[in-house]
Image: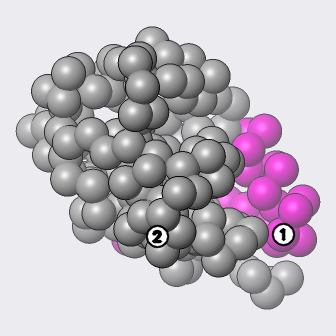
Amino acid sequence: MAPDLTLRHTTVPTPFGPFTVVMSPDGIVATTGGDPGELVDQLARRLGVGSRVGSRVAPLRGATRDLAAYFGDRRALTRTPVDLRLVETTFARAVLEVTQTIPYGELWTYGDVAAKAGRPGAARAAGSALARSPIELFVPCHRVVPSGPGLGRYGGSEDRRAMLLRFEGAI
C-alpha cells in the first residue's frame, strides 16, 4: 500500500456482537470482533497509512449491506471484494481464495482446501494460513474443519465456529 493510502472502517452490530470491517480502496483488508481501534491502529502502523472512521464510503456501505443480508436473510457474503495484500505467502493467498469459494452452509476439510490451492497433502499448512487470516466471514474460514472428530479451534474458540455453522445450518 502506498503511504498516502487511507484505510476506512466501520463497526456493524451483529447477533454475535460488534463486527468491524477495515477497507482499502481494493476491498476488505481486515475484520475483527474485538477492539476496532486496536486493529485499525495496528494496520495503520504496519502499513504506514492513515485511517478514517465512517460508513459514508460506498464500499463500506456495501460491506454493511452484505453483513445485514448474511445475518438477516442467511445468505453468502459475495458482493464486497476482499484485499489479500496483507497475506504474506502465495500459498496462504491461494488458501484464502479457495476458502472464499466454499458455499454457504457447507463444510470442507483442511485437506480439501490444500488440494484445491494446489498442494495436496498440505492440510496443516492450509490450517496455519487460515489461522492467520485477517478477514473473518468474508473469507469463511469457519467452514473449514479438521478431517478428524470435532470442529477444531477457530479464532481461539470452538464455540464461535459452532455458533456460525449452526447459524448457517451446516451442523
Question: Which residue occupies 90% across, 60% down?
Answer: 45
**Residue 17 visible somewhere in the drawing:** no
Q: Is residue 168 above or below residue 157?
A: below
Residue 43 appears in the figure: yes
Q: Give the range drawn in magenta.
A: 37-62
- Note whether 152 is above or below 65 in the view shown: above
> Which residue is the extreme one toward the left?
73
Which amino acid, mark 1? Leu
Most frequent secondary structure within the magenta stretch: helix
Most foreground residue, 17 or 147: 147
- Could you tell me which residue is drawn at 83 percent across and 50 percent down? 42
Q: Name the residue under label 1.
A: 47
Q: Which element type, helix, strand or loop, lies under badge 2?
A: loop
Of labels 2 and 1, earlier in sequence is 1
Residue at image mark 2: 117
Q: Is residue 44 magenta?
A: yes
Measure the alpha-carbon separation of dots 2 and 1.
27 Å
Q: Are marks 2 and 1 in contact (CB under 8 Å)?
A: no
Question: Residue 22: image x %, image y %?
Answer: 58, 56
- The C terminus lies in which quarter of the figure? top left
